[in-house]
């Protein structure tokens, strides 16, 4: 079978011929202005519920109000000299103000740089400087942290503080968000601009080197929201109540702000309160029907509910929830099954900052039983509309989509990054090939476009000249009753180059013989690790994924100490 | 409330500033090539079932096969001199070959002109000449009809006949579809072109003047399919079985071929066999879950099932069906309720050739009962994503979206025609205003973007200086138990200018007093018609709508004869 796309399209996709004639449809740009129109004229009464405190108090804001306030924010920034093409940074949790910042800043043709709250201070300053952020919109609670970094952000001319909490003094003007909005009378109108204009900038927290900036266009934001609304993708509808349990500073909050506007669903902004007790209360109080995020917070929620079995509200908690889209890492089978018992459909999505989330999503076949569908739902899914993928081996040979061949996924399409912001072509050469983005994810793809992730390229373990998938080992170990969480990394080994080493979070001491026996029926014998180690918790990166870099460092430290391996 | 869009966008939507910076996403064109990739690499095993005969025999074709054959058709046309930008016509029922013609002709950058089978011979020849069709792809059963018109189609260089039936001899080469495909070896690849290239041409069967051509772009086709996949719009999913009960020569078959490819649903092509018995058999045999069309065929089906109550299969017939999207005219309440009894959700859609179907679609609120939702579901719906609408009175004043004000709907967006093919600007001046398309549909719009159609502008009845809605009268009369079908038109009247006249299809003689009494509780007293007339059937236009022009002509004839009105 020929698994490679057969269209003769190069990297640039220029029209080949002046002989095609243009269609006579309106030349109407795909911009966030279309979301703005919809908020005012189609779903003005849909609501955003925004958390106010740790006690679970929420403010209610209609879409019409949010649209009006977005426009006033833009007017206020415009009045202070911010222009189309400039960068404005946000440093904030999920809140209605952050959502207004999305709409207002992008709507005026300015680029919103959503700074990741969880990266190191050095990187925060570095990205703000690299982006050339001219203004900063920050939560009052986060002001003390970022204000100490302002010396390293020379382009920031003024700061807008969300909330009324005290903040330290700085050498630049500080405006209060609510006062800025209140001052405007609403005579401002968003300008027109091309749909290929930049709308937002997100930096990936790379494991090596400096962060890399993905510069999203308006066109790609609209196409992503439209695509994700599909019933087999995110499947959000008008009468859903969506919990934005993904930070707005991660890959455009997975597009949820825009999808919510497109459909008119209600949207709940939980701030930083995603701990099990808060999460349970938020779901109950708002009747959440749809949510997303990394598996950990949902596993923690289930454990919390288990620990409070005597409380009748446990069953009520999840009664409104119908669908969970999880990503960032493989989804534990146990989580899928336990959610299934609550009648919650768990699907997993694959994507990255460079592609938006949802480039592939699990499609559940209603004719399959839960047990039949389970293996497919752990990781990966079917390629979503407008994305094209191919599989390439480490020699650059294109592999068949036969569900057997393992290779790196390469992806292209109108929602895929073509470059990184501010880098020279030679600096990004290894990330792109012939117009395709190299994802660094190793997978199989079957003839029905189903991607099954094997590993990150850098997390594959090379043992005796063959590859071992750390993810396959993790999935197999997760099925063991004593295993709460597991991460496998390569341990340097003189004889085999590398051998797998399993870090396990368990309620009891590890029964290594039992674990090895468990694995023997599930993976090839030579994959079974010799070494296991119990941890209280597995370190995670800023995006909630296992921090394998930290685990490898720990392993090296132990090896160095014990002298097993220099 | 300010009901007008507040963005300051003019008709042309040119970027205002070189100060915006371009985003760094791939410049990947939205063309039918993306559907082609999806057929081969994501849903190769989904099927098209294509009718072969009146006995209900269907052929099965996988998406992979259809993609391959589309490419070969393109190769065959290319070999015979057809080039990007040329027009190729189809004159065919719904079949797998017609679908391949869609993909092949559009994929090669050529424009597919889908000739409406139901227009007059003169108009068929006129549109083919106007489009400059260079080749014609025709069903064998339809060849005798169109071959007599070839003298009036000077640009047609050759004809491709679908099927193996005998056809008359002509003065131009005839190729058999299957033979053309079989000759190609598959070394052809679709060319690259701009997403704004023309893909297809549909002529509206205007009630006055010559037909007008809507020239669809590739971009608009992709955006339409993406938008309609939304759960609150068409809501088609991977495991649906879609019956294409709308002709492929009507507004791109409502986009169903493309939506089906996008989702991977199975697609059933029923040819011309939509009579109740055939329709029932097709639904049963294929387990149809989703369909669409004009209300008549579905009302006929229900009546047919009622007449065969003794047959147990009646209940089975609709057991698989979950959703019907109806359009073209208001949907009888009785049809919605009877389908509801079979657990089928009926939604109505609004749109036109110039906007694609689905510019507004009924969104059913799951918290409402059937009775509560019924009034809204009869006609109109909520504005779909990427469409913007406004309401304008006959003086050009923009009206509020308050659910009360009646005006003409104007619409704009990337799936809306900006012009008609081959006409001079002055010839289309009355159809567009400031970058908006004037639809000729009279409606109210409420603050939630819900369009309730009142009438076609030309079907409003002017009586005593005030307007009467013929559609409101029809909806009210449809609730009467003796009324099967009803059409109301304006009858010339010396005193009042016009008075409404009701044509009614009924199983019994009309009880005029009873009908008037029925209406008195439902519409203003002065709306109640003085004159009623029983018909065996109401004449319909080629698109299945009531032919009010014919009804008015009939009325005039009667008036002329009786001398009531000169």
Image (cartoon, coloured by chain):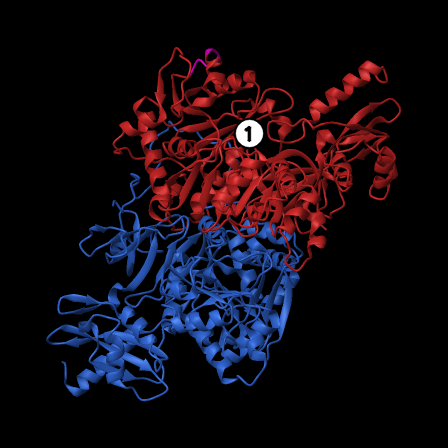
Chain colours: A red, B blue
Chain to which mark 1 belongs: A
Q: Position of residue A266 (x, y in %)?
A: 44, 45
Q: Residue at x 52, y 56 (%)?
A: B259
Q: Position of residue A393 (x, y in %)?
A: 73, 36
Which quadrant of the figure contains the C terminus of chain B?
A: bottom left
Q: Position of residue B372 (x, y in %)?
A: 38, 63
Q: Secondary structure at mark 1?
A: loop
Q: Nearer the viewer, residue B13 or A557?
A: A557
Please tell me how crowded label 1 is: few (under 14), some (14-19), or many (20+) other residues with Cα within 10 Å.
many
Q: Which residues are magenta?
A: A151-155
The quarter of the picture where residue B550 lies is bottom left
Q: Residue at x 43, y 69 (%)?
A: B336
| Vertical arrangement, residue A514 with respect to residue A20, above or below | above
Give the prevailing secondary structure in the magenta stretch.
loop
| Vertical arrangement, residue B312 with respect to residue A215, above or below | below
Q: Position of residue B122 (x, y in %)?
A: 36, 72
Q: Is B146 in the magenta?
A: no
Can residue A145 be seen in the rendering of this structure? yes
Q: Nearer the viewer, residue A375 or B442?
A: A375
Residue where numbered disc 1 is placed: A419
Residue B201 placement, left or right of B471: right
Can residue B150 be seen in the rendering of this structure? no
Which quadrant of the figure contains the N terminus of chain B?
A: top left
Q: Residue furthest bottom?
A: B509
């Amino acid at each position: 079978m020929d698994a490679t796309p057969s269209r003769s399209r190069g990297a640039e996709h220029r029209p080949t011929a002046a002989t095609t004639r243009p269609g006579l449809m309106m030349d109407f740009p795909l911009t966030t202005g279309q979301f703005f129109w919809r908020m005012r004229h189609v779903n003005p009464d849909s609501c955003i519920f925004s958390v106010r405190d740790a006690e679970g108090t929420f403010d209610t804001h209609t879409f019409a109000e949010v649209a009006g306030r977005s426009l006033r924010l833009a007017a206020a920034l415009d009045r202070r000299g911010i222009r189309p093409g400039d960068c404005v940074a946000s440093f904030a949790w999920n809140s209605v103000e952050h959502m207004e910042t999305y709409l207002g800043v992008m709507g005026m043709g300015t680029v919103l740089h959503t700074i990741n709250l969880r990266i190191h201070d050095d990187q925060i300053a570095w990205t703000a400087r690299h982006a050339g952020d001219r203004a900063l919109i920050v939560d009052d609670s986060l002001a003390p942290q970022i204000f100490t970094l302002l010396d390293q952000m020379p382009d920031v001319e003024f700061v807008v503080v969300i909330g009324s909490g005290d903040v330290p003094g700085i050498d630049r003007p500080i405006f209060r968000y609510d006062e800025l909005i209140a001052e405007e009378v609403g005579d401002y109108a968003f300008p027109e601009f091309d749909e290929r204009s930049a709308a937002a900038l997100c930096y990936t927290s790379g494991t090596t080197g400096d962060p890399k900036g993905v510069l999203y266009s308006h066109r790609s934001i609209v196409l992503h929201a439209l695509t994700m609304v599909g019933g087999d993708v995110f499947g959000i509808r008008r009468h859903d109540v969506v919990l934005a349990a993904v930070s707005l500073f991660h890959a455009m909050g997975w597009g949820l702000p825009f999808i919510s506007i497109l459909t008119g669903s209600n949207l709940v902004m939980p701030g930083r309160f995603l701990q099990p007790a808060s999460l349970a209360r938020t779901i109950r109080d708002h009747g959440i029907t749809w949510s997303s995020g990394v598996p950990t917070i949902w596993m923690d929620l289930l454990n919390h509910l288990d620990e409070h079995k005597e409380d009748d509200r446990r069953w009520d908690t999840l009664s409104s929830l119908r669908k969970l889209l999880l990503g960032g890492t493989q989804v534990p089978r146990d989580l899928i099954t336990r959610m299934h018992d609550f009648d919650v459909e768990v699907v997993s999505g694959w994507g990255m900052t460079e592609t938006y989330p949802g480039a592939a999503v699990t499609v559940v076949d209603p004719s399959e039983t839960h047990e039949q569908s389970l293996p497919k739902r752990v990781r990966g899914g079917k390629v979503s509309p407008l994305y094209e993928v191919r599989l390439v081996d480490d020699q650059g040979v294109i592999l068949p989509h036969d569900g057997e061949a393992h290779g790196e996924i390469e992806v292209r399409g109108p929602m895929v990054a073509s470059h990184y912001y501010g880098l020279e072509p030679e600096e990004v050469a290894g990330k792109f090939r012939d117009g395709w983005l190299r994802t660094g994810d190793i997978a199989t793809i079957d003839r029905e476009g189903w991607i099954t992730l094997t590993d990150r390229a850098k997390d594959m373990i090379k043992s005796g000249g063959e590859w071992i998938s750390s993810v396959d080992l993790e999935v197999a170990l997760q099925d063991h009753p004593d295993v709460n969480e597991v991460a496998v990394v390569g341990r340097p080994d003189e004889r085999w180059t590398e051998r797998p080493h399993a870090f396990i979070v368990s309620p009891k001491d590890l029964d290594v013989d039992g674990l090895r026996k468990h694995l023997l029926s599930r993976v090839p014998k030579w994959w079974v690790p010799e070494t296991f180690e119990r941890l209280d918790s597995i370190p995670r990166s800023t995006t909630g994924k296992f921090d394998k870099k930290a685990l490898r460092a720990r392993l090296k430290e132990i090896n160095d100490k014990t002298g097993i391996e220099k």
